[in-house]
Amino acid sequence: MIESLVSQRIATKDAIQILLNAAFSSGKSFALWRKPKSKVLELVLDSEEVTRKVGMGIEELPAGFIVHPFEDQENKQAFFIKACSYFSLNLNQEVQEIDFPEWVKVNPDPNPKISDFFNRKNIHSFSNKEKQNLGESKSHFIELVEKSIQSIKAGYLEKVVPARTKTITISENFDLVQSIWELLFSYPNSFVNFFHIPEIGTWLGASPEILIETKGDEFYTMSLAGTQKAQGDNPLKSAAWTQKEIEEQALVSRYIVDCFKKIRLREYEEHGPKTVMAGDLLHLRSDFRVNMKETNFPQLGSVMLDLLHPTSAVCGMPRKEAHDFLKDHEDFDRSFFAGFLGPVNVQGSTSIYVNLRTASFGENEITLYAGAGVTEDSDPEKEWEETELKCRIIGKFFQPQLS
Ligand SMILES: C=C(O[C@@H]1C=C(C(=O)O)C=C[C@H]1O)C(=O)O
């Protein structure tokens, strides 16, 4: 009797493998995540094979996981994985087999070949492959930064955030669960996320940046910018920031305050900037909090989501001009990179993150995405280096030589 009880306990990593196998085999959309500083891994699975799209009124949505690309979609809609089933596990505890949801217990294919599910289709099935290749080119990125600096000097823009891609082959012995496991423990301060929408694609990331969060009456957002490699014994204490980085982050804060002004919201708390760590990178971050009850803004979450995205941390300032500049010159499709994603109305809270430090799965390869904030004083070569560091955050779990 005791023996059979013991045998029903499953090590956490094995439990993740069992969950992922069942979720892939189901043919439905699902997402898995762990919030910063949390020990709880959460998973939602849809019960239908349709690809759902929803509007931005997040307060009215059922529990689920929202995924929005960088570019606005028709009717401003986002993809949505409805939490028809929700499961969570404590990363420090074994799992009792009996606690698994029914769809795991009846999984007809307990050992699917997971790579067969990667990205057979993609919303951005890159019709113009040549153009998409430009995202991979160093010389194209350097030129893009040079053009950015010129536009800033000419007074068209204050800041712009050009991006690039880096496609690497997935090694034969790649193990998805092992990679997710390592991400979880390497990046305790990041939002580690994985989603699979069969019609749309499969992505894995570890984002350091909240776009909006609401819990009870509290609304929260942050401005995050400035990047340097963490160095020394106490990187948070010893970090020094240049004027360029301080101004770059201040612009992102100003952008948030301007959004508050647009809706005449005056009562907000602002703290920072302070130095924070994300992986082995340091950033400057300011925190903004609003009590939605006291300010009588129960829908602040969706209002700010609409006003903030894409923020000047991933697009630029002024927003429209920076966005137009990227459309004209970036020459590749950002797809879900620098869009947003996260749980909505799950366990009483909504936490939507900017989709950074992220990768999309192809059949035998993954594409990493990274951008860098450019101001008047930027050095193109340094911005390239910054994107290399950002690509490494996820890339090193696919190719150890990147670490
Ligand atoms: C654009 C990215 O990151 C954003 C840009 C930063 C910067 O320019 O220093 C820092 C953090 C993020 O807000 C990215 O990770 O790709």
Image (spheres, rainbow, N blue to C red):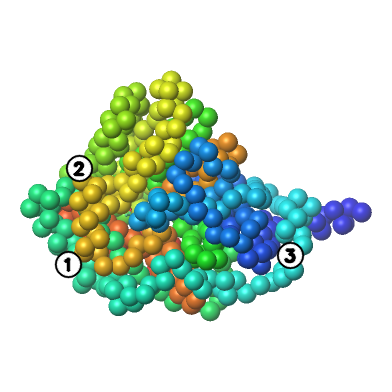
The alpha-carbon separation of the residues under discs 3 and 2 comes to: 53 Å
Question: Camera-side residue: 370 or 179?
Answer: 370
Tell me the distance, in whole angstroms, between the alpha carbons under discs 1 and 3.
51 Å
Q: Position of residue 39 (x, y in %)?
A: 58, 46
**Which residue is disc 3 drawn over?**
107
Q: Nearer the viewer, residue 106 or 145?
A: 106
Q: Residue at x 49, y 64 (%)?
A: 200
| Residue under the image location 16 percent in, 55 percent down | 378
Task: Provide the secondary structure element on which disc 1 rests.
Answer: helix
Q: Is residue 341 above or below residue 267?
A: below
Give the numbered dot on residue 247.
Answer: 2
Element at label 2 = helix
Q: Amino acid at mark 1?
A: Glu
Residue found at the very far top of the displayed protein:
294
User: Image quadrant for the C terminus?
Assistant: bottom left
Residue 234: horizontal and vertical position, in percent?
A: 36, 45
**Crowding near the residue tagged with mark 2, few <14, some 14–19, many ≥20 C-alpha atoms within 10 Å:** some
SS for callout 3: loop
Q: Earlier in the sequence, mark 1 or mark 3?
A: 3
Q: Residue at x 39, y 42 (%)?
A: 305
**Measuring 9% from the left and 52% from the top, which residue is drawn there?**
153
Residue mark closest to the camera, 1 vs 3: 3
User: Is mark 1 in CB contact (under 8 Å) with mark 3?
Assistant: no
Of mark 3 and mark 2, the one earlier in the sequence is 3
For the residues labelled 1 and 2, the Cα–Cα distance comes to 23 Å
Please state which amino acid type lies under the numbered disc 3.
Asn
Q: Cβ–Cβ below 8 Å for labels 1 and 2?
A: no
Q: Where, by quadrant of the figure, is residue 178 drawn?
A: bottom right
Query: Can residue 14 be seen by looking at this rendering?
Result: no
Percent x, y of residue 53: 50, 53
